[in-house]
Image (cartoon, grey):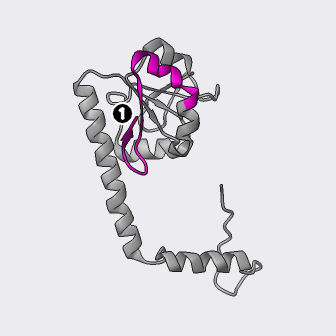
Amino acid sequence: GSLRVYAQKKNIGKHKITDSVVKLIEEEKQLGIDNLSFYKGFQKEINVVKNRMLEFLIQATEKNKLVAGYGAAAKGNTFINYSGLRSDLISFVVDKNPYKQNKFLPGSRIPIYDETRIKEEKPDYIVIFPWNLKAEIQNQLSYIREWGGKFVVAIPELEVF
């Protein structure tokens, strides 16, 4: 999803605060999102996620396991760059979008290929970056089980399956 935001001084400007915005602001207050302590807690939580993923990837690398990623979208790339991941920990990423293939993820410079690379390289682990689509991607790539491949998601918690 996405939001369109209009910024202006309160009660000054051509855009009125709609009922849906008032409702959203109230929901945010009830969740504590309008409070600095919420974001400090979020920072701690995301650091735990990052550190668990780094620990897993470092251990996999030390065991000479090949790790690839699935999905070159902004969500995963944000996590990759925040976590400081590079191609020494994730060898490559695959994506269905032909416009992303044979390029590199911004920041990390991890190469992006089409899905056939998985069958060629036979990675031990595939990190699913669009974690909200893990069931769909797991079904789509179920053939990795033929060589003992496993899936990994980092969010909401590190899971290897």
Which residue range is magenta in the image?
139-161
Compared to residue 43, the image places residue 139 above or below, namely: above
Compared to residue 146, the image places residue 17 above or below, namely: below
Is 110 within the magenta?
A: no
**Residue matched to label 1:** 86
Q: In this view, does 99 lie to the left or right of 13?
A: left
Give the residue drawn at x 53%, y 34%: 71
| Quadrant position of residue 6 | bottom right
Nearer-the-camera pick, 112 or 118: 118
Q: Is residue 3 left or right of residue 143?
A: right
Give the residue drawn at x 37%, y 55%: 46
| Quadrant position of residue 124 | top left
Furthest-top residue in this view: 120
Estimate how packed mark 1 is, as few (under 14), some (14 to 19) or many (20 or more) residues with alpha carbons within 10 Å.
Answer: some
Relative image position of residue 39 (x, y in whole percent):
40, 68
Nearer-the-camera pick, 54 or 152: 152
Relative image position of residue 106 (x, y in whole percent):
48, 37
Residue 8 visible within the image: no
Residue 67 visible within the image: yes
Question: Which corner quadrant holds the N terminus?
Answer: bottom right
